[in-house]
Image (cartoon, rainbow, N blue to C red):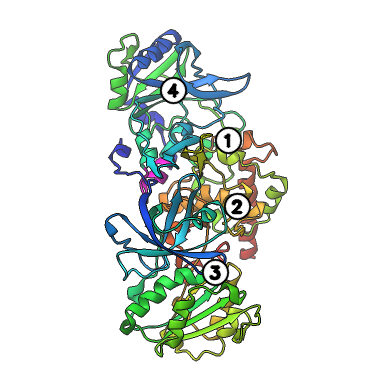
Amino acid sequence: MEISAVQSKNLYYPIMSEIIGVEELTQLEKKFEIVLPDKRALSHKPGQFVEVSIFGFGEAPISVCSSPTRTDSFELTVRKTGRLTDKMHLLTAGSRIGIRGPYGNGFSVDEFVQKDMLFVCGGIGLAPLKSLIDYTIAKRNDFGRIIILYGTKSPAEILFKKDIEHWRNRSDIEFYMTVDRPDKTWSGNVGVITTLIPPLSLNTEQTITTVVGPPVMYKYAIMALKGKRIPDENIYLSLERRMKCGVGKCGHCQINDSYVCQEGPVYHYPRIKNLEEAI
Amino acid sequence: MARQPMVNLEQMNRYFFDQETTTKFIRYLMNKATVIAPHQKGETSWSYEKVDRAEEVVLDYPRTIQPLKKYFLPPRETLLSFSIKDNCFKEVPSEQEHRIFFAVHSYEMQSILRLDYNFSSGNPESNYLQRRKNSCFVGISFRPDSYHFSKSVGIEIEKLEGFSLFFEPVEKGYLVFELDDAGRDLLDGFNSGVLVDTPMDFELTPKNFKSKIKYHYNRLPQVFEYIYQSKVWDMVAAKCVGCGTCNLLCPTCYCFDVQDEVNLDMIEGNRQRFWDGCMLHSFAEVAGGENFRDKLERRTRHRLYRKFKYITEKSGELHCVGCGRCSKYCPAGINIVDIINDLIVDYTEQQQKQVN
C-alpha cells in the first residue's frame, strides 16, 4: 500500500525554549525575547509566526516581531487576551515555553530589493510588520525609501516606543503616526490610520505596501492606497485567523480554499482580493 | 468514466463461503490481528467495533452511525502528556497494532483514501499515518437505502480500490474475491472456503440508488464555480440548527480542536485533540472575538465547498463519498442531495439567463 511509503513525523511536539527577557510595552502588551536550545536560529522569514505553548494552557499562534538578521534570539509581542496569553504575561526571564515553527508564508523580501517600502500598521499589526521593518533597516542599502505609518486607538496603546524614537530620529526613515482618540499628552495627528495616506508623495510603481491591522482596517486602507494609484500587485497583507495547528490540518484558519497557516498569514493582495471571506 | 467493476472481479481468484464458513473465517482472522467490524447497536443502528465474538458481526447493514475514521483520527486523542510542575512533556508512543477492518462498504473505503490524501499531503502527519499503516480492509457489497448516493459521486457499490478481499452476497452465502497479496495472506491457511474455478456464469443483481444527484459527478466542480452567491445557502441555513452533527458523522471531515486537560492533581495533564466542525459557531473565531464565518449560511456553504471544490481542486476527487450520514442524522431534516440538486437548479437558471 502506497500510504506506508509516506515519510511522516510528529508535527505537534514543541521545542522547549527559554525566555531571556520581558519588556512591558503597554498595559496589555509585553515583548518576550526567546532563545531556542543551543541558541540556534529560528530561521524565520519576516511575517512568519510560531505556535507558543504553555502546558496546561494550550497553544496560540504569535507573529515573530524581530528580524531574521538577528540570529541568536527572537522576539514575540503578546497581547493579553485569553487563557494562554494571560498566563504568558506572568512569566519572567528564565521561564521555559514550548515553540513550534516558524510557520506560514512570510514576506518575500528578495522581491522587495531596491523598492520603496510603505508600512501601514494598525494597532498590534505593528508587531508582525516590525520583523520586516527591522529587516529593511538592517539591510538599509538594499531598499529605497522606508515610510512607516502607524495608528493606534489611543496614546496609551503605542507599542515599541524606543524603536519609534529611533525611527523618528533617523533621516533615512519617514515615520508618521496618528491616534483615534487623543489624550492630554498627545500633540500629534488625530484620526484613523487611513488619513495618513493621502498626504504622502509616492512613486507608486516603485512602492511596495504592506498592511497589517485589525480586520476592519484592510478595506479602508486598500481604498486609500488605490486613491494613491498603488497597483494591486504592490500590496501585501498579513491576515489574522485562528491558526490552531499551524501545519494545515485543523481547518480553523481556512479562508475559502486557502489555509492561512500555510499560504498566509502574508498574502499578495491579488491572491485574496476576490476571496469573499478574506477582508 | 463509469467503472466496470465486474470485469475486474472476473479475473480474481474467488471462493464460495457459506454463512458458517464466513463466521469461521472471521474467527480465523481474529487469530491473526485485531478485527474490527459492524455490530448491531440498538434496533436500527450499527457501529464498527472490535470483534470479540465472530457471531456478533453483522454483514448486512445500511451504514454505521460513526464513520470508520474514528480508528484513524480518534474522536479524542492524546497528542502529548505534560507535567506542569516540571514544565516538560512526554511523547505518546505510536500505535503499531495490526488491524483488519471487516465488512466495509466501498464509500467508507473511499473516505479513508480521501483522509489519506489530507494527512499525507503538505505536512504528512505521523499520528494519522502510523494508525493507517498495518491496516487491511475487507469490503462487502450493500443494499442502498434512501440516503445512500455514493454512485452519484462516482463510487460504485463494487468499487474495489483499497480492499484486499471483497464479499459479494450470493444465494446461501458469499463469493469472496481475492484482490491483492494482502488478501491472499488473509486467506492463507484457511481451508474451509471452496475455490470457484468455473467462469462467472451469473450476473450480480444490480442495486438501485433511490437518492440521486441530477448531474454526473464530473460536472459538480463546474456547478460550484457559479453558485457561491446562491439563495440556496440562505434556505438551508433557515432550517439548520448549527449542531455540527453533519461534520462529526462525515467520514471525510477531519478538522479538529486542541485543548490542554489538566488532571485533578493540577500537576500533570494531556494535550488532547477532538473532532471539531466548521458548522459550529465559534469554529473561525479568533482570540479578540472576531468571527470570520459568523453566519450559518456561510458555514453551510463552507462545508459544501470543502466537499465539492476546495480540496477537489487539489486532489482531483470529490470529498463527499455519498454515505448519506449527514442527511440521515440531521436533526433538522436537511438532505445533502436536496441541497446539491437545488444548487444545480440555481446553476441551470443562471446559465439560461446568460444564454438569453
* Badge 2 or badge 1: first in the primary sequence: 2
Of badges 2 and 4, the one in the foreground is 4
Secondary-structure class at tag 3: loop
Q: Quadrant of residue B166?
A: top left
Labels 4 and 1 share a subunit: yes
The N terminus of chain B lies in quadrant: top left
Q: Badge 3: few (under 14), some or many (20 or more) residues near its Cα, within 10 Å?
A: some
User: Which of the numbered marks, if any, corresponds to residue A114?
Assistant: none
Chain letter belonging to callout 3: A
Indicate the position of residue B143 as horizontal and vertical percent values.
54, 25
User: Which of the numbered marks, if any, corresponds to residue B36?
Assistant: 4
Vertical side of A8 occupied by A77: above or below? below
Say left or right for A98 vs B67.
left
What residue sits 36% from the left and 78% below the top?
A136
Q: Badge 2: few (under 14), some or many (20 or more) residues near its Cα, within 10 Å?
A: many
What residue sits 61% from the left and 50% below the top?
B282
Amino acid bearing label 4: Ile
User: Which of the numbered marks, if any, corresponds to residue A26?
Assistant: 3
Amino acid bearing label 2: Arg
Disc 3 and disc 4: Cα gap in Å?
57 Å
User: Which of the numbered marks, if any, corresponds to residue B301?
Assistant: 2
Say left or right for A209 vs A141.
right
Chain letter belonging to callout 1: B
Secondary-structure class at tag 4: strand
Indicate the position of residue A194 as horizontal and vertical percent values.
58, 80
Q: Which residue is mark 1?
A: B324
Amino acid bearing label 1: Gly
Indicate the position of residue B256 as horizontal and vertical percent values.
50, 44
- Of residue A138 and residue B347, the one placed in the foreground of this image is A138
Mark 3–mark 2 contact, CB under 8 Å? no
